[in-house]
Image: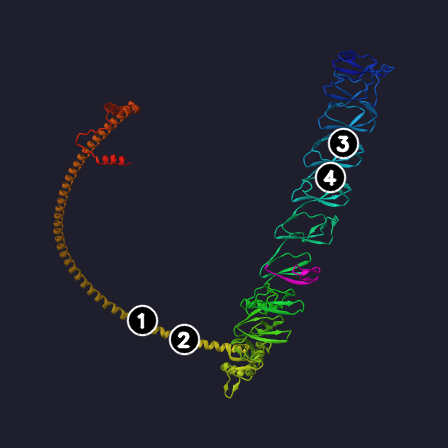
Amino acid sequence: MAEYVTRIPPNQYIHVLDQNTNTARLEVGPLTFIRKEHESIIEGPNKMISLPPKTYCKIQNPILRDVRNLPVKNAYGEVEIQRGEIEYRTADDYSDPFPLFPGEKLEGKVETLLIVQQNTALRLVAIRDFEVEGKKKQAGEEWQRNGPFTYYPRAEEQIVEIVKAEVIKPNQAVKLKATQTFIDKKGKERRAGQEWLIRTTGSYLPDTFERVSEVVKGVVLTDKVCVHLRALNEFTDVYGIKRKPGFEWIITNKQAQVHITDVYEQLVAVEQAITLGSRNYCIILNPYNPKLQQNDWGIQVLIKGETTFFLQPGEELLGGKIEDIVILGEEEALLVQAIYDHQEEDGQFKKAGQRWIVRGPREYIPGVKILVIEKRRAIPLDANEGIYVRDNRTGEVKEIKGKTYLLEAHESLWEKHLPENVEILVQRAASGQPYVPPSVQASGKMTYNFESEKLKPRDKTKIISFKAPHNSAIQLYDYKLKKSRVVFGPDLVMLGPDEQFTVIKLSGGKPKVENLIQTLTLSLGPDFMTDQLIVETSDHAKLKLTLSYNWHFKVNKDDPNDAQKLFAVKDFVGDACKSIASRVRGAVSSITFEDFHNNSSMKIREAVFGKEGSEIRTSFTFDANNLVITSVDIQGQEITDEATRRQLSQSINLAIEISSKSQEMQSRHQASKLEQEAKGQLARQKLLDQAKAEETKIELLKQQAQSAKVRAEGEAVARAIAETMEKKIKAEAEVNQAELRSKALQIEQEALLDQQRQEQEAEINYQKQLIDLEIKKAKELSDIEIKKFKQQIQAIGKETIIAMAKAGPETKAKLLGGLGLKGFLVTDGKNPINLFNTANGFIGENLK
């Protein structure tokens, strides 16, 4: 029975299916539901849907209601539902919890109503035809509701988006685009796809068919900043100027303080002003012509400072930079070339391609028709310095030496190239080495390789100078004049434009190898050279001789032909050594080894120098180049034949053995002799030492006696001196005592006098103080009397005193008047009276 009973709590519901009629109904709690046999609970118990304030829910397949808002039932008693429909139920309409009828479904959750704020709008679209607030809406139609309001969703409409207002700050604008043709807020027709700007500062809420493309920021224009614009379409800008498509222009602060790029304007760039100082200038290519409103293509304009300007579209700076005025010093100049025919400021006419020099000191600004090729500076040259200068008109090359030189317009510096080996020799000579020494390989072979030398960079336009060493000669060849000259050292050689050094290649090493030494200087000697040669005697003994020859050149430096003769022989060392070796071989081949061994020096000198009669000459001269051989020295000789060398070695060993034994016997005899002499010398030295010892003893005894004598004399003298000093000290003590007693008496008398003087001074001070007190007392009494008198006078008063003074005379005058007397004189007879003046007065008055 319990399975048929279902207790439904309050605010809950169940759906019951009647299986007989196949209809479903709703049962709402609180209720105890007893299910019948043909009934079944298909859903529940479920809680009813409660909608708090400002909330809503979305119901699918809502029930159909009549005009009284009651559910409509069909013929079977089942509540009819609207399948496929959606109903939004809000807390305003459903404040109490409500159940869902069979077939209804809750889609999603209970949600809060959307509150659209200020400066916000809700863009809606109709998904079916319906009427709202007396206006018909067709499916697909969009409209917008501006906040603030609370949005109640409807099944006939759908939210497209929430539109927020754009805040337009100062120097900003909002670019809008129309999605379809409409009339905007200002009553202006906007077509679909059209764009425009809203520049009014504040918040702007786009309308239904307006879309915000972007927020455009303005560019602040100053004296140094402008904007470069390009028109995308034909329009009239905010300044009232009509612009054509593709036209470019600039906006400066003279037109506006801030520029916001319009919809038909393209911001090409924010340009910076070009500022020229007083020492600057620039050349503008393709200047803008304001009259024609286009660029003068291919034209150049020169602008000098001081000024500030902006480049117009199409204009550009020549070289892309600001140029400085060329300031030429006193030793500077510019090489310039005319690009076009023109007339200079000084009236000179210049043709295109003409070159000339602008000399300093001055300031120079090249015009647009002038090309500056290079800046030149005068080249200061010492007496031993120079440069190679080429005349570009004739091709002639000259040398300039010992002065300051500035190249002319048709001149240029010319580089003189030297062969690589000559370049190395010149640099070696500058460092103090007149030739490049050969390198010695591990096998002992000497090679001459210039590739291992690294050349230092050299200014090839400067004249090549070469210091010819002392007692040397250098040959120079001029290929233009086809002449050669010889310079003797010490001297400084300065190579001409067409001159080259003659490289001397000499044989070197032992034995001599050709072309082993290369040098530019030919030493005139005296010097020596060493060679090795193989000779063979008449008895077929082969010897290797090392010979050294002293040589020098005999030349008259004042005779050019004699000087050229020095270089007549290409390799004088190899030639001389070959010639001398030939002479020596011929001479040695005619004598035996024994004869040569005993007279080698004489035989070689005779072979080299020859004989004049019975005497050997002292020198040998090569007439081809005046080379003189003055002496020959045999530095070494070595037997190359093995048998001869063995026999010579045995004889030498025997001679050495005999010599060694002889020296040994002599050494023994000498040692025995030295030993006997040493023994005799030792005995003699002993006797001398004993005699000297006895003499020393005698001297010691004498010194001891002298010392005793001196000691006795010293003691006697000391006693006498002590007694004398004792008496002297006593006498001095008595004298000191007498002086001290005298000083004590003097001090006592002085103290007594000082005491009396102090007593007298104290008495005087006492009397003085008494007198001062008496004076002070008298002064104070006088002041008191004066003060008393003043107070009395002040108490009586001025008028009273005057009246008292006048009272006596006035009384007397009245008494005399009563007696009839006009005047009288009263005297005591002691004081004299002068009556002469009185008489004169009387007489004078009568005379008057």
N-terminal-most mark, 4 or 3: 3
Question: What secondary structure is marked by label 3?
Answer: loop
Kindly report the distance in space between the C-alpha atoms of the residues bearing marks 1 and 2: 22 Å
| Magenta residue check for 792 | no
Instruction: Specify start and end residues of the magenta stretch as a single range.
Output: 337-361
676 w.r.t. 275: above or below: below
Q: Is residue 20 left or right of residue 498?
A: right
x, y percent for residue 74: 86, 16
Asked if the residues shown at circle 4 and circle 1 are in contact, with their CB atoms under 8 angstroms apart, the answer is no
Q: Residue at x 67, y 58 (%)?
A: 371
Is 45 in front, or is 719? 719
User: Which residue extends farthest right?
Assistant: 75
Amino acid type at circle 1 is Ala
For the N terminus, the quadrant is top right
Task: Tell me the mark number nearer the camera, choosing from 1 and 3.
Answer: 3
Q: Dot 3 corresponds to which residue?
A: 186
Location of residue 533 with respect to 301 vertically, above or below? below
Question: Is the C terminus in the top left, top right, bottom left or bottom right quadrant?
Answer: top left
Q: Secondary structure at mark 2?
A: helix
Are the residues at dot 4 and dot 3 in contact (C-beta closer than 8 Å)? no
411 shown above or below 269: below
Q: Which residue is mark 2?
A: 663
Q: Please, what secondary structure does the residue beneath circle 1 have? A: helix
- Amino acid type at image mark 3: Lys
